[in-house]
């Protein structure tokens, strides 16, 4: 039997090695410092981004960085301490697509438990019709909904978001969506068949 390893091998407080243990009053294995006894928790990361609408098209960026180099995505990234989700989504859009946007409404929250991520995607519009690739993008382009390159999208979260958006637009009723994306262990991030969708709510 393989002994699980902590993803926090050293204590951020004192630098000593950690060990996996169930702390008193807890039910889960945690990284516990072997020296100072501090318990370190691993919490999900929040990813925020924008679905930018313009002339019945959406703005996509082709990634210049790994993972998923060369594939298309919505402008999105990790939320920073000190900013709201909407502020973070606007910042990421400015950084990746050089587009100054106004948030219209929240569109989707997507939880991916296996990799410890939660996405919040906002609908947004450009304040001026101007965009260009930022330092993390090879190119940026507006796509008509029928032309979105689903075989070249970067992540399951982006695939799911755009599928839901297209369905809403074609139905003439854009909703707010929540779902869980259950990724299959060992599957690639952009494999169209690497995940299932559960708990989908649309209001």
Image (cartoon, rainbow, N blue to C red):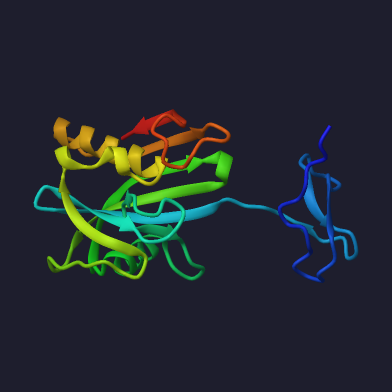
- Residue 76 visible, this orientation: yes
Q: In the image, residue 47 lies at what x, y percent?
A: 45, 54
Q: Is residue 181 left or right of residue 95?
A: right
- The picture quadrant where one finds residue 155 is top left
Q: In this view, does 148 lie to the left or right of 92?
A: left
Q: Residue at x 32, y 63 (%)?
A: 137
In this view, which residue lies farthest toward the right?
35
In this view, which residue lies farthest toward the front?
70
State which quarter of the image contains the N terminus: top right
- The picture quadrant where one finds residue 9 is bottom right
User: Is residue 165 placed above or below 130 in the rendered structure?
Assistant: above
Q: Which residue is drawn at 42% across and 59% down?
A: 77
- Please name whichever residue, 7 or 37, is drawn nearer the observer in this view of the structure: 7
Q: Which residue is drawn at 42% across and 64% down?
A: 84
Q: Is residue 161 left or right of residue 37?
A: left
Q: In the image, residue 122 lies at what x, y percent?
A: 31, 52
User: Is residue 101 placed above or below 110 in the rendered structure?
Assistant: below
User: Is residue 71 placed above or below 87 in the rendered structure?
Assistant: above
User: Is residue 171 placed above or below 31 in the rendered structure?
Assistant: above
Q: In the image, residue 27 lies at what x, y percent?
A: 78, 39
State which quarter of the image contains the C terminus: top left
Q: Is residue 43 left or right of residue 14?
A: left
- Please name whichever residue, 8 or 22, is drawn nearer the observer in this view of the structure: 8
- Residue 176 visible, this orientation: no
What count of labels does the image hold?
Answer: 0
Q: In the image, residue 119 lies at what x, y percent?
A: 43, 49
Q: Which residue is drawn at 49% across and 54% down?
A: 46
């Amino acid at each position: 039997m393989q002994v699980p390893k902590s993803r926090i091998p050293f204590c951020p407080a004192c630098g000593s090695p950690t060990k996996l243990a169930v702390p008193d009053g807890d039910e889960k294995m945690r990284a516990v410092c072997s020296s100072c006894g501090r318990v370190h928790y691993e919490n999900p990361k929040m990813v925020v981004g924008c679905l930018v609408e313009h002339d019945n098209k959406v703005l996509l960026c082709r990634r210049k960085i790994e993972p998923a180099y060369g594939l298309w995505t919505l402008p999105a990234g990790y939320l920073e301490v000190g900013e709201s989700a909407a502020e973070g989504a606007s910042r990421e859009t400015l950084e990746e697509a050089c587009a100054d946007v106004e948030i219209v409404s929240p569109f989707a929250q997507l939880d991916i438990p296996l990799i410890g991520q939660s996405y919040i995607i906002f609908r947004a519009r450009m304040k001026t019709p101007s965009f260009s690739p930022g330092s993390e993008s090879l190119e940026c382009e507006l796509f008509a909904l029928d032309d979105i390159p689903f075989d070249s999208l970067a992540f399951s979260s982006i695939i799911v978001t755009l599928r839901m958006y297209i369905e809403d637009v074609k139905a003439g009723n854009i909703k707010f969506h929540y779902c869980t994306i259950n990724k299959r262990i060992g599957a690639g991030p952009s494999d169209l068949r690497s995940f299932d969708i559960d708990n989908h709510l649309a209001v």
